Image (tube, rainbow, N blue to C red):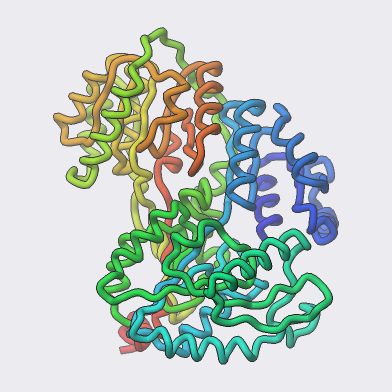
Amino acid sequence: AIFSGQVFAALATGNCVIAKPAEQTSLVAAFAGDLMYQAGIPRAAFQLLPGTGAVVGAALSADARIAGICFTGSTATAMHINRNMAQHLPVTAPLIAETGGLNAMIVDSSALPEQVVRDVLASAFQSAGQRCSALRMLYLQEDVADKVLEMLFGAMDELNVGNPWYLATDVGPVIDRAAKQKIDAHCQQMTQQGRLLKSLDVPDQGLFVAPTVIELDGIEQLGEEIFGPVLHVARFAANKLDAVVNSINEQGYGLTFGIHTRVDSRVEQVVRRITAGNVYVNRNQIGAVVGTQPFGGEGLSGTGPKAGGPWYLHRFVSEANTQLSSVNLPAVDTAALQKLVSSVAASASTRANPDIEKLQGLASNEGLEHDVTSIVDIRAMPGPTGETNQLSAHPRGLVLCLGPTRADALLQAISALAQQNSVVIVAEQAAELGELLQQSGMNAAGLDGSVEADSLRTLTGADAIMSQADVEQLRAYRIALAQRDGKLLPLICEHDEIDRLIVERHLCIDTTAAGGNASLIASGS
């Protein structure tokens, strides 16, 4: 589904496609490719190119004829691809990356233990834990932890590990020997530390990994994703719920998250603070449904936009005539820039949401034709009875607007502020623009001058970069951003690419778990 979805999205927007599947899945990819040809997709528009990432993948991501790359896989590989693209591909070539996650679930004392066990089994062990959405870290409120674990261990004893061709099989093998060795080594290390709680017997032959439960003090001890049927468990006190959410967020990932509770206020409390692309309440956290639950993460878990979301296809097209500017401005001091970014970021929570009419007026007063639009909203998604699905758009954070001209910088700032971001402007007459925006109640500041690419390698606190500088400068910016560790920061070269100034989050709630679907009951009466 991931492979085909990327191919079809690219084709639907008028692109030709070279598809390189994971080297372990070449046969099924070839089968899928034949079905596409049978369906009428021209061979000139779609070609399969199997091979290793080190050879074929590296060559494709360094070929200037490639207009963009879609990738699903590890965070480390996504960073490597991004660095290759920055050096060789067009500066505006998109990377749409959906990467891994340290996906967590929180279970409080009000949750139904039977439902928790059902959903944990599916989330952690289905597909042998080889889903990017799979549950890796389970937090159990200490009041109910022993009871839930006892039921979970009993349910695990009923799992059938074996050949996935058979319907009776619950857990199949992992993808290759290297994966098995890495997972087994992790489990052995945890066993030596006395953290093993439960492990099943598995066949001696084949690439089977025992479904395993390991106890940790918290997610910070996990360090990296273990991509297999291994569930880590930690206990927490009821008054430490906020600390648990903070710890999960601090890991930097943000793909899937689950919570089991029958307390509505607790759902609101956690959902408001968790930074994850897909949040599930009182259900499992795998198997996002096309058309109902657009899928994708943030931070270390992906670049966006969400697959199946309203902005996905938009990322596969480009502006016919990108307007770039060249202005000779002195470079600002990196330390001064860092101080200003930190100051603006610190005050973000104290500022009210921007007034769209004021922003429109600022553009008009400068003689700029620009339709100021906000896409920060919540929309209901279709779904089955007994389930609520909502897709919401949220500000990305702090946007660095690098002009370089006054007009470029103002339009960039207005677009970013309209999506409720904070902005720091470094461009022609940026200090004046910053004061102008502050007087209108915006969280903004400016420095006159330009930013050297080297400054972007170490700058902290920025969540996106906007610039319409010349191609040479944009290339230097993109290379510098690609050399950073951590999440991939977008370089936005058009002021009206407002979809790249937000992050998308989806919320799915099983309404039957808390006593029924209130809206359905109301409609019946």
Snapshot quadrant of residue 125: bottom right
Taking 226 as reference, is 384 above or below it? Answer: below
Q: Residue shown at 35%/74% (left/top)?
A: 236
Q: Position of residue 327 (x, y in %)?
A: 41, 10
Nearer to us in this view, 11 or 467: 467
Q: Tell me which residue sits at (39%, 31%) in the image.
A: 459
Q: In the image, 403: left or right of 422? A: right
| Residue nearest the observer in this picture, 163 or 360 | 163
Which quarter of the rendering shows the C terminus?
bottom left
Closer to us: 508 or 249:
249
Name the quadrant containing residue 352.
top left
Q: Does any portion of residue 259 appear in the rendered image?
A: no
219 with respect to 180 (left or right): left
Whether residue 514 is visible: yes
Is 62 drawn above or below residue 287 in the view shown?
above
Seen at 68% across and 61% down, the residue is: 182
Which residue is depicted at the point 28% across and 67% down? 269
- Left or right of residue 513, residue 20 in this image: right
Asked whether, in this view, residue 267 is left or right of residue 315, the answer is: left
Residue found farthest to the top: 328
Number of marks drawn: 0
List x then y, in percent, for residue 198. Answer: 58, 82
